[in-house]
Image: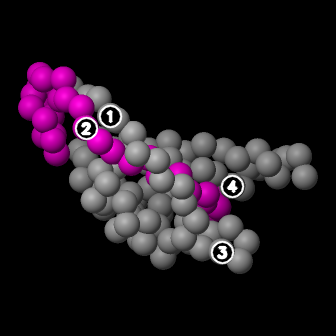
Amino acid sequence: MQINQFKIEIFIPKEFVEQLGDKLSEANVGKIGNYDHCMSINEVKGYWRPLKGAEPHEGNIGELCKGEECKIEMRCKREYVENALKIIRKVHPYEEPVINVIPILNELFE
């Protein structure tokens, strides 16, 4: 059986959460039944060290950095995943955004 639902998990600065959520909702991400704009947001602390050749949004080359971010989680049908990834990369300010696409197995057990 093919997996048709995925969770997209994104780590992003707080000031970009609303814009990204709106753009993804316009692309049918975060739609569950008769509801749209469904997303979970958690504040997290992120750590990173930009290496030589990086162009960091925040921080300096070679220095360990930390900052407040938000983790956004939204459901997405298979046919919208590719477009969702394009939208995330367009809106996201980081050179290398952390994006996880995770299969949802619920339908295998229904």
- Residue 5 - label: 4
What separation in Å lies between label 1 and label 3 (alpha carbons)? 31 Å
Name the mark on residue 35. Answer: 3
Q: Of circles 4 and 2, which is in front?
A: 2
- Quick check: marks 4 and 2 in contact, CB under 8 Å? no
Residue wearing tag 2: 67
Task: Give percent across and percent down for residue 31.
Answer: 62, 69
Within the magenta stretch, is there residue 67?
yes
Q: Which residues are magenta?
A: 50-79
- Residue 80: tell me if it is visible: no
Q: Which color scheme does this rendered protein use?
A: one colour
The percent coordinates of residue 8 (x first, y second) are 53, 51
Q: Secondary structure at mark 1?
A: strand
* Circle nearer the N terminus (4, 2): 4
Mark 1 vs 3: CB contact within 8 A: no
Q: Is residue 96 left or right of residue 9?
A: left
Are the residues at dot 2 and dot 1 in contact (C-beta closer than 8 Å)? yes
Name which residue type carries label 4. Answer: Gln
Nearer mark to the viewer, of 1 and 4:
1
Name the residue beneath numbered marker 1. 46
Asked whether disc 3 touches disc 2, contact meaning CB atoms under 8 Å apart, the reply is no
Q: Callout 2, which amino acid?
A: Gly
